Amino acid sequence: MGIVSNGMNFQKKQKEDFDLNLTPLIDVVFLLLIFFMVTTTFDKETQLKIELPQAAGAQKQVKKMLEISIDAKGRFFVNQHEVVNSGLETIKKAIKQAAGDNKKPSLLISADGQATHQSVITILDAASQLGFVNITFAANEPQPKK
């Protein structure tokens, strides 16, 4: 007697290999990385380090001012842009360019406590020659004594 087959096929089905494609996930991670790098903002204080002297009567000004900064090394900055050299004519040109159409801008002088007196006088001289008279000095309030 032989084996009789009634037409049923009981062969094992081969399992399909499961393949996870990580390429789209990696692409999304890189796009997020680029997005966060582009949208990161940097703090203004990290650009120019100035330690202001102290004054008890320091007040905060709300309106837009033309900021002139002098660091401890005697370098001049007009609205956070460094002036090429410390010559009076160069400083006057930089202030006039930053002022634009405003003929009587308010000037805020932020001089480092270690800046020379001559550098502050140079800024005052340039401002007076340009006819700017509304000048304010930036200072920190003194710390209360314990």
Image (cartoon, grey):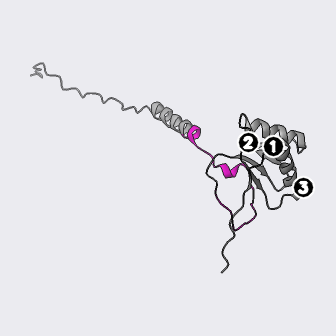
One can see residue 73 in this view = no
Q: Nearer the viewer, mark 3 or mark 1?
A: 1
1 or 2: tag closer to the N-terminus? 2
Q: Is residue 32 left or right of residue 80?
A: left
* Tag 3 secondary structure: helix
The residue where tag 3 is placed is 118
**The N terminus - image quarter:** top left
Q: CA distance from mark 3 to mark 2?
A: 24 Å
Q: Nearer the viewer, residue 62 or 13?
A: 62
Q: Amino acid at mark 3?
A: Gln
Q: Residues within 10 Å of mark 1 (few under 14, many from 20)?
A: few
Q: Quadrant of the C terminus?
A: bottom right
Q: Is residue 118 above or below residue 18?
A: below
In the rendered view, tell whether residue 81 sits above or below residue 7: below
Horizontal side of 21 relative to 33 (left or right) equals left
Q: Amino acid at mark 2?
A: Lys
Circle number at residue 131: 1
Span highlighted in magenta in the image: 36-60
Q: Nearer the viewer, residue 74 or 60?
A: 60
Which numbered disc, 3 or 1, marks the residue that appears first in the sequence? 3
Tag 2 or tag 3, which sits nearer the N-term? 2
Give the number of the disc on residue 104.
2
Residue 6 higher or lower than 99, as above or below:
above
